[in-house]
Image: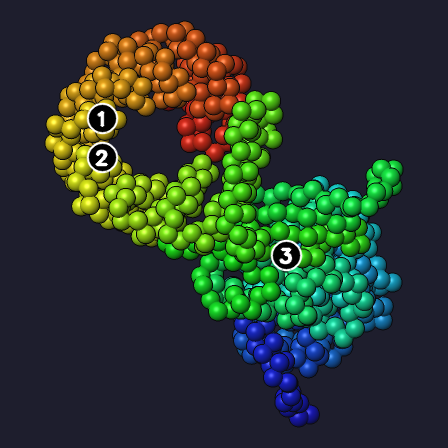
């Protein structure tokens, strides 16, 4: 009998790509087979193959038969053992015979599989059973778990699940398994009953809704050009067959999977957060159905418009200034109290102060809700906004009806009206300061929003009074009260540009403010920005020295140079400042800053005697100078003069008892002299004063262990870990205590 010729199989381009992709990963399928212990696990391992079309499966098996690899033979054995289609099993058998002819044999045997003929008679096609999803869309993630009934009498369940990330990667996790129906039901019930962690509620999810969520997550992946999750890629044939390429996924009820019990402030803040982070699906879903912010666009059109803006504007580092609810406007018509109290509240107004770093782009004009920055820091790109938000109840949840750019609206008010509001706010702040002891919590909240709004009034006034120095001075003073150096920098730059007669003072303030801001940007991602700000600060302070060659200007420049470890130049600036102060009216603040700067430089260069002389001079000029008594003690300790060091440390305790370094140094001195009880007394008193200082608890634990009180040492260590679990010092103390030794930390 003549042998049967190979029949050429016609595949569509898509099937060809799927087959080639799967063929390139067949060793991974074989590895999964090797770990299989029953038929369900074998079927899971082969799922990527069995979800292909029959012709594509046959083509793949033919390719495997030509590899002369035992892994390929193992896959053919598995297909021949469990596949429900007779023709596919026959092709697997032919492939095995071909491999045997080239002396390639399988190394794996299917564990306890049923006869394929029986499966063919009893297997049922999968059908969607149920799904659940977390109501956590506002957090940027949703976990979706779907289940299909399959097998004999539908006694098995295939589970496919995802963790979807709508902020960056799209699909963060993907998994699949086959369980008995009873086991699957128990697990799904457990997920729903325990809310996947306790704080996040779950809700039933249809196949159509799951498909919509997955497609939106995939669009995030495509937009951000992120790498697709490896587990998802491995399961893609299965996902296509069961979800993405299903002809009729059923009913989509329009669920948005957002927590239904969010308070109105949470809704508004989540909208601004999603809008700033690029989660425009969430932002759109938090809008009321009839909100004009939708701009008559479909959800997909709205998302695409905003993503285009995001790609050009690069918004980053959202900061919230204030969020507060406005009191409802009372109706002029009289209504009985019993009626007004019984009415449900269906509308609320919020004021939100916020800021965002972004680049200017013409596309900002295409966004209906885009606010105007009332102040802009040109170095960091931060814009400050004031937005009023109207929320309404829809289906028992708060949604955003309208957004009003209050910052822009203020600029339409008259100078007189703005000045009146500024005076009213300043009066309220002064009154609050006088009465803050009665209700400190509310005072802090009120001063925060009043100062935030006051700066927007200042911004509006500066539009009208561009050449009024007093208006700029008020804005500067108000910004200083907020402690926001990034905002303060905006007003100082304008003062320098517009009022050259006061250039020196404003240049000094600006340089110092830039340096302060630079040191707030920590971490590798901010190196360039920090360096740029420090460079600008140095240039500004050098310009201040040029404009006003004074001791103060050179002192500030010296302090900046010390902070960036340019010691030689810093020392020269301090010496220049000292020389310029000769013959001038005595200014102790400048003189003690000069001496402290020279002392710090001497310490870095290990010229301890010189440092000691400078620190002594600082203590004579200003006994309350921060850290001077500790510095004197520390310098004496480095010189080996322990009695003098102890004296100065004890003096430091009297003036700055919150300085943790003092307790550490005194404890070390006492322990060195064997005075453990004295160290214990010192730390007990310190912990009574500062019970939340993790370092003190850890230091006390070390002392107790040194004394031999292991039980109390462990107790103090546990307290320290509860306060600051990631501290390197606390971990070192733990090693000391549980290593069995008595090595001091």
- Pointer 3 residue: 403
- Between residues 492 and 175, which one lies in front from this camera angle? 492
Residue 483 percent location from the top left of the image: 44, 38
**In terms of image quadrants, where is residue 673?**
top left
- Between residues 716 and 602, which one lies in front from this camera angle? 602
- Pointer 2 residue: 552
Q: Residue at x 30, y 49 (%)?
A: 499
* Residue 345 numbered mark, or none: none
Is 19 placed left or right of 742 in the picture?
right
**In terms of image quadrants, where is residue 242?**
bottom right
- Between residues 502 and 479, which one lies in front from this camera angle? 502
Is 631 placed left or right of 609 in the picture?
right
Q: Residue at x 27, y 19 (%)?
A: 622
First reached walking from the N terminus: tag 2 or tag 3: 3
Please report contact status of discs 2 and 3: CB closer than 8 Å, yes or no.
Answer: no
Q: Residue at x 47, y 50 (%)?
A: 461
First reached walking from the N terminus: tag 1 or tag 2: 2
Task: For mark 1, give the secondary structure.
Answer: loop
Mark 2 crowd level (few <14, some 14–19, many ≥20, 10 Å Cα): many
Residue 149 percent location from the top left of the image: 81, 62
- Pointer 1 residue: 587
């Amino acid at each position: 009998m003549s042998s049967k010729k190979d029949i050429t199989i016609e595949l569509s381009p898509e099937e060809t790509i799927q087959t080639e992709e799967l063929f390139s990963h067949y060793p991974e399928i074989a590895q999964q087979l090797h770990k299989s212990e029953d038929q369900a696990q074998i079927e899971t391992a082969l799922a990527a193959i069995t979800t292909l079309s029959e012709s594509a499966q046959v083509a793949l098996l033919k390719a495997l038969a030509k590899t002369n690899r035992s892994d390929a033979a193992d896959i053919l054995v598995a297909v021949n053992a469990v596949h429900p289609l007779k023709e596919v099993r026959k092709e697997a058998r032919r492939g095995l015979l071909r491999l045997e002819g080239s002396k390639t044999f399988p190394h794996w045997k299917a564990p306890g599989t049923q006869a394929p003929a029986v499966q063919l008679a009893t297997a049922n096609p999968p059908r969607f059973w149920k799904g659940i999803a977390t109501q956590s869309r506002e957090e940027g993630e949703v976990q979706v778990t779907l289940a299909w009934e399959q097998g004999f009498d539908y006694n098995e369940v295939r589970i496919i699940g995802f963790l979807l990330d709508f902020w960056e990667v799209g699909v963060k996790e993907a998994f699949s398994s086959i369980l008995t129906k009873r086991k699957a039901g128990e697990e799904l019930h457990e997920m729903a009953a325990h809310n996947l962690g306790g704080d996040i509620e779950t809700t039933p999810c249809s196949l159509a809704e799951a498909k919509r969520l997955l497609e939106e997550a995939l669009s995030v992946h495509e937009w951000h050009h992120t790498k697709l999750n490896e587990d998802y890629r491995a399961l893609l044939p299965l996902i296509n067959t069961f979800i993405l390429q299903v002809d009729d996924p059923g009913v989509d009820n329009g669920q948005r999977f957002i927590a239904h019990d969010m308070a109105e402030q949470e809704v508004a803040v989540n909208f601004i957060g999603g809008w700033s982070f690029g989660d425009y699906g969430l932002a759109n879903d938090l809008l009321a159905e009839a909100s004009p912010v939708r701009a008559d666009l479909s959800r997909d059109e709205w998302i695409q418009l905003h993503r285009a803006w995001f790609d050009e504007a690069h918004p980053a580092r959202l900061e919230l200034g204030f969020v507060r609810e406005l009191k409802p406007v009372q109706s002029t018509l009289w209504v009985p109290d019993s009626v007004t109290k019984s009415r449900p509240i269906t509308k609320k107004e919020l004021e939100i102060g916020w800021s965002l770093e972004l680049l200017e782009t013409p596309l900002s004009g295409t966004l209906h809700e885009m606010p105007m920055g009332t102040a802009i820091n040109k170095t960091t790109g931060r814009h400050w906004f004031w937005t009023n938000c109207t929320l309404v109840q829809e289906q028992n949840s708060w949604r955003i009806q309208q957004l009003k750019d209050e910052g822009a609206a203020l600029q339409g008010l008259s100078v007189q009206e703005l000045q009146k509001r500024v005076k009213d706010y300043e009066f309220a702040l002064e009154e609050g300061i006088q009465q803050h002891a009665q209700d400190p919590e509310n005072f802090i909240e009120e001063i925060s929003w009043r100062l935030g709004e006051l700066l927007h009034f200042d911004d509006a006034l500066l539009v009208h009074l561009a050449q009024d120095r007093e208006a700029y001075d008020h804005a500067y003073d108000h910004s200083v009260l907020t402690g926001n150096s990034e905002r303060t920098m905006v007003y100082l730059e304008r003062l320098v540009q517009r009022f050259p007669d006061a250039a020196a003072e404003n240049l000094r303030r600006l340089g110092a403010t830039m340096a302060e801001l630079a040191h707030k940007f920590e971490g590798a991602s901010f190196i360039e920005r920090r360096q740029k700000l420090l460079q600008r600060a140095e240039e500004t302070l050098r310009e201040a020295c040029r404009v006003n060659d004074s001791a103060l200007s050179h002192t500030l420049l010296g302090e900046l140079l010390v902070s960036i470890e340019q010691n030689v130049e810093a020392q020269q600036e301090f010496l220049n400042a000292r020389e310029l102060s000769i013959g001038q009216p005595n200014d102790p603040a400048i003189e003690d800053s000069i001496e402290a700067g020279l002392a710090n430089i001497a310490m870095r260069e290990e010229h301890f005697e010189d440092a000691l002389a400078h620190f002594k001079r600082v203590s004579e000029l200003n006994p309350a100078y921060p850290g001077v008594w500790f510095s004197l003690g520390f310098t004496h300790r480095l010189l080996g003069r322990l009695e003098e060091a102890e004296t100065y440390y004890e003096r430091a305790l009297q003036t700055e008892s919150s300085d943790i370094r003092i307790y550490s140094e005194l404890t070390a001195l006492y322990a060195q002299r064997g005075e453990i009880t004295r160290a214990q007394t010192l730390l007990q008193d310190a912990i009574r004063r500062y019970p939340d200082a993790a370092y003190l608890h850890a230091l006390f634990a070390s002392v107790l262990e040194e004394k031999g009180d292991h039980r109390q040492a462990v107790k103090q260590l546990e307290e320290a870990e509860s306060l600051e679990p990631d501290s390197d010092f606390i971990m070192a103390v733990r090693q000391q205590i549980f290593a069995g030794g008595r090595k001091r930390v």
